Image: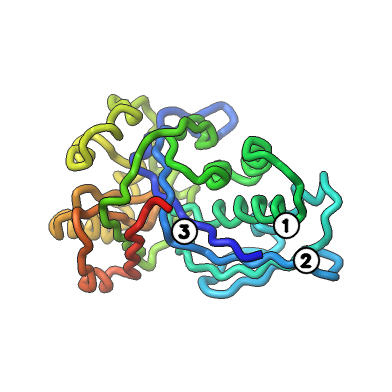
Amino acid sequence: MILFANAKINIGLQVTAKRADGYHELNSIFYPLPIYDIIEILETDAEHCVLSVQGNRIPGNTADNLCIKAYGLLKNEFDIPAVSIDLIKQIPIGAGLGGGSADASFVLKGLNDLFQLNLTNAQLMKYAAQLGADCPFFIANTPVFATGIGTDFKEISLDLSEYHLAVIMPDIHVSTAEAYSGVKPMPSAVNLEEAIRLPIQEWKFHIRNDFEESIFERYPLLKEIKEALYRKGAIYTSMSGSGAAIYAIFWEKMDLNEFSKYGKVYYPTVLNK
């Protein structure tokens, strides 16, 4: 079984409060982004689940990979055999694009189909929530207004398929802990669920990512990229999640070759499948 696990962008990210359990209350729009990791899942005679990775290097111990943990969640409750998971990692890491979360959720969906477990999306989302805050989004994989710690979703009507999008990924890795250490949680004056309904050319006046202020201070190159994208004619541009990827939405497809001096340039031009 071959799966194409897509990334996502955050359109706006408000950090509104810190909870007693250490997590933060968020408001954000999650939107699917067509940059893909490729996953192949095959039944194997091996004693345990085996993960192999090609492409971008994933730091850390393989045993801690969310794909392995996703398999373990279902193995604990269903009599499924061991599998080999071959992952071609193309979504940039430490980008705020949700690549690791996407991989884990697509493994859940793939195992559900491969072994005919007949789990509903609601059931799969409960498993995904045990893996990470972004993971449940990739089960239904449709635009949502996300609240809570990023696991409470309300479907929204948002279609950006008539626009053209670019992502600039510099050689900067921003850890989630680093991002949260610089943010000051506070209620936002902007109702994000209402602001997303404004004409897209008005988003830059109302929709912001609360992580940008402190992250841009630490990494001025990210602010430089954002400002350069606006000068290039972007309708809206923002850091996604806790960074470091900067995306921009344009009226038409743009040649951004000059941005290669900042890092890798992606052109995911069709946002809705």
Identify the amino acid type marked 2.
Answer: Glu
For marks 2 and 3, give the one nearer the viewer: 2
Foreground mark, 1 or 3, reads 1
Q: Which mark is residue 51?
A: none
Q: Earlier in the sequence, mark 1 or mark 2?
A: 2
Can you identify the residue that label 1 sits on?
Answer: 114
Relative to 167, say whether 181 is above or below.
Answer: above
Separation of disc 1 and disc 3 at Cα? 30 Å
The amino acid type found where label 3 is placed reads: Gly
Question: Residue at position x 13%, y 57% from top?
Answer: 231
Residue shown at 48% from the left, 62% from the top: 36
Q: Secondary structure at mark 1?
A: helix
Q: Nearer the viewer, residue 10 or 117?
A: 117
Q: Is residue 84 left or right of residue 89?
A: right
Q: Position of residue 208 (x, y in %)?
A: 29, 39
Q: Earlier in the sequence, mark 1 or mark 3?
A: 3
Report the residue marked by disc 2.
43
